[in-house]
Image (cartoon, helix red, strand yellow):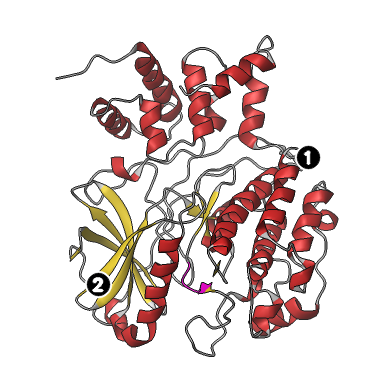
Amino acid sequence: MTRTRPADHARELALLREGLVSGGLVDADGFAAIERAHEAEEGSPIDLLSRLGALDATLARTLRAIAKGYLRAPLGPLLAGFRMPAELLPAGPSEAPGGPALEQGGDEGDGVLGPIPEWNSIAASGDGVERPRRRSLAARPRPTIDRSAFGDLPALGAQIGIYTLRELLHVTPGSAVFRAYDEQARRAAVIKMVRPDVLSRERARLHAEARILGRLSHPNVIRLLGSGEHEGVPYIVLESLFAIGLDEHLEANGRESADFVLQVAICAARGLGAAARAGVIHRDVKPANLLLYNHDGRVKVADFGLASEGASIHPDGGGTLRGTPAYMAPELVVGAAAIDHRADMYGLGATLYEAASGRPPLCRPTALETLRAHLRDPVAPLHTIVPGFPEPLSAVIGRLLGKRPEERFATWSECLQTLEALGRVVRSPIADAVSRAVSADASSSTLASIYGRRG
């Protein structure tokens, strides 16, 4: 029997239909799935999408205010980063218009990218630098994987615990990554399992990754859903995000604005700070391992496959130096006896530098030359190579890229406090879009009351 719904719910559905369907972010079938899910629950449709991770708390409050007539704002910029929740995707192999989720990467941090809704917002961003309008990024064709080259991998359709394997996404030197689905809970997931042909070498590493992720619970860190063994082969289950790697985003759109870079920095610092407080060093911070789940720069730190617990240069007990040359801290390059969280600061600095300038700070023709550059070559300050880039943010990124650990921030808390202080100066795209659209007679006190409500 159909429930009688409050008028607010009808207004929210109408608003979402206008923003999502008319905006080309969701087709009619996709919106029907949202309506069915709403009908099955007690809360409002905006509450539903917020709970499923498609809308953050601030955006949900903004949409409620618009639905109630308290606020006027363009829906395009607000909903530009919307991705259909995995729980509402069809159970079959076809994908919703929002495209497949980015699946958790392995050692290389690769992901699967679906079409990104066109983002026709600012032509000039917060740093005063002109930007081309966002392009629509088509799904990248996936190369066919020769399964026979990687040992006896499970067949598609195999049951791994409560999950059914749907697709082999990619294979890394130590693991295979599958898209999977929990039919009963109607929840997508990612399963990363050790390749059977390298089981003896990689078993301990995957167990370590599961142990590390099990200790971490933070909104800016990829979430572990479970772990186990299948026919003697260990695996971990990770959340499936409607997101793309920051590397994919930069490849499609080029360098980003200062406000975007700052948002990435704050989110990554929060996630890496939580890891550091748990005694975890990521050791491979780079764009591919930051999952962008909203176009304004919000990210989750992913792929803890190289992470260590405590000050150990070789978490696998071997003597092989692992990492990605373009983002490796000097102390990682020289194989220092011990490292700490400040090595991750360097990787974040290199990542932010690339996001702002379009290239890593010390990228050379060969890996060896790049590693040597990290040891001896100076980094040009961002504000000297990116016209209009804010000098205070340039200085923070430069400090993250200090050659010696003591030249960087002492703690992630200190780094985060500095970044958040800058955040009061460099505004986010959503905040700007809302403030520009507010009617002239809407007072600050009225807005404060709207944003202070719990909907």
Q: Is 323 located above or below residue 75 in the figure?
A: below
Q: Which residues are magenta?
A: 304-308
- The quadrant in which residue 43 appears is top left
Mark 2 touching mark 1, by CB under 8 A?
no
Q: How many marks?
A: 2
Q: Measured from the top left, where is residue 119 in percent x and y?
A: 55, 38
Q: Measured from the top left, where is residue 245 in percent x and y?
A: 51, 57
Q: Nearer the viewer, mark 2 or mark 1?
A: 2
- Residue ID for mark 1: 128
Q: Measured from the top left, where is residue 146 in percent x and y?
A: 31, 76
- The quadrant in which residue 210 appears is bottom left
Near mark 2 (Cα within 10 A), the count class, few <14, some 14-19 or many ≥20, is: few
Q: Which residue is at a point 44% across and 54% down the rendered structure image?
A: 113
Which element carries disc 1, helix, strand or loop?
A: loop
Q: Which tag, 2 or 1, sits closer to the chain's start?
A: 1
Answer yes or no: is residue 48 visible. Answer: yes
Q: Quadrant of the C terminus?
A: top left
Determine which of the numbered discs, if any, sits on residue 170 in the image: none
Instruction: Check residue 7 for magenta coloring.
Output: no
